[in-house]
Amino acid sequence: MPDSKSLSWNHALPAALLLMAPFDLLASLAMDIYLPVVPAMPGILDTSPAIIQLTLSLYMVVLGLGQMVFGPISDRIGRRRVLLSGALLFTTASFLLANASGATLFVGLRLLQAVGASAALVATFATVRDVYAERPESAVIYSLFSSMLAFVPALGPIAGALLAKHFGWRAIFLTLGILGLLALLQALPKWTETRPALATAPPAAFRPMLRSTAFWTYTLGFSAAMGAFFVFFSTAPRVLMGQAGLSEVHFSLAFATAALVMMVTTRFAKRFVAAWGWEGSLARGMALLLLGAVLLVIGQALAPPSILTFVMPMWVIAAGIVFTVSVTANGALQAFGDRAGTAVALYFCIQSLIVGLLGTLAIVLLDGDTAWPLAGYATFMALVTLTSLKALRSEQRRPTAAMPADGPHTP
């Protein structure tokens, strides 16, 4: 049953989404909106390109690994304090970045910005787990968050380029600071504490999660889904503009259709998850990834790169991503309600490592100018996830199993 603190979170779903979504979006936007000015930053800050590259790579590393710190902290002191502190740090660092003039200070502030984003992100998802884990709205929240994030890589660089062109590079970080401040001011009076009352400072022990088949199964599914989009995002410019010859405008429109498919699928995700259950939704999501990969292989083998051969198969994968991410957080974290912050941190950290390492490896080894990296990653990770799901079902059928199935399941 929900804890009394969870019951104090009495926002209607649209209001809750409006409250939480900015913290999910800002963590990614701070990366993507900055990309257009990266080539100019060595000259602006009188430093080397390698130092500026650190502002990208270190941001990603700190964003992922920081959750391993803030997850356990949120289990100890609560979600609200971690979220507000992280939002304040992100906002402050963004405003200071807009006024930075030296490379050392700039890199340091980017690190602080990532620390703040990491804290706010893990507190946001821990709150979702606290409040909505046993409610059907969770499928809508998780899938909608992922769908909204699909627009950030598509629109973020465009927004950054326009801001830099008309107002200068500092306007990018000033905009991030303003958006962070607005999100913080909205959260201050409305974001109530949701940490379960019984979660009295549990130790930051990761072993129970790492030994859980359910945790690994759903975390692998999340990695498969989000990694597929990462590989698509990374290779689409090279395939569609470099090989298919699309203009920047036509590329942006084609790219956005994948996000549109995710948004439309999200509209129906709640109904399908209720019918299929967590395991059924995960299995069908992986099946769609495999189907999309098959279509990519056929297109790559039989026709030149085009929207038909590259983007339309991604529509199938995009639907699979939505069905997958609608259930993976609940499936992975269901058994760890007393330490949801720690579990969320590990969940996102593992996903970040898998996507970053295997996704990049697929792009490097399988020729990023083709559909092979996306087809290869989607196929491999979907098969790994389905194998783990089979093991989970076998484990649940054992009479001696210590714990019954996590959440609703398909017969």
Image: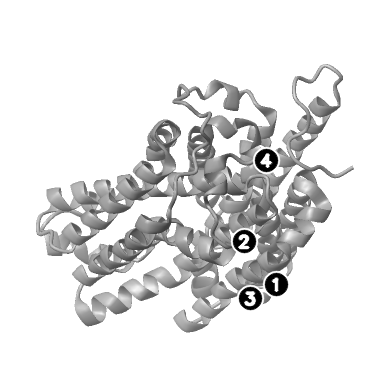
User: Which residue is pictured at 67% across the width and 40% down the height?
Assistant: 331
Q: CA distance from mark 1 to mark 4?
A: 40 Å
Q: CA distance from mark 3 to mark 4?
A: 34 Å
Q: Do callouts 1 and 4 mark residues in contact (Cβ within 8 Å)?
A: no
The picture places residue 121, in percent across and down from the top left corner, at 43, 49
Which residue type does callout 2 highlight?
Ala
Q: Do callouts 2 and 4 mark residues in contact (Cβ within 8 Å)?
A: no
Labels 3, 4: front one: 4
Residues 19 and 328: in front is: 19
Secondary structure of the residue carrying tag 3 is helix
The picture places residue 374, in percent across and down from the top left corner, at 61, 56
Residue with the mark numbered 2: 371
Residues 152 and 176: in front is: 176
The picture places residue 334, in percent across and down from the top left corner, at 65, 36
Residue with the mark numbered 4: 331
Q: CA distance from mark 3 to mark 1?
A: 11 Å
Q: Do callouts 3 and 1 mark residues in contact (Cβ within 8 Å)?
A: no
Which residue type does callout 3 highlight?
Ile
Which residue type does callout 4 highlight?
Gly
Residues 397 and 382: in front is: 397
Residue with the mark numbered 1: 303
The picture places residue 149, in percent across and down from the top left corner, at 50, 62
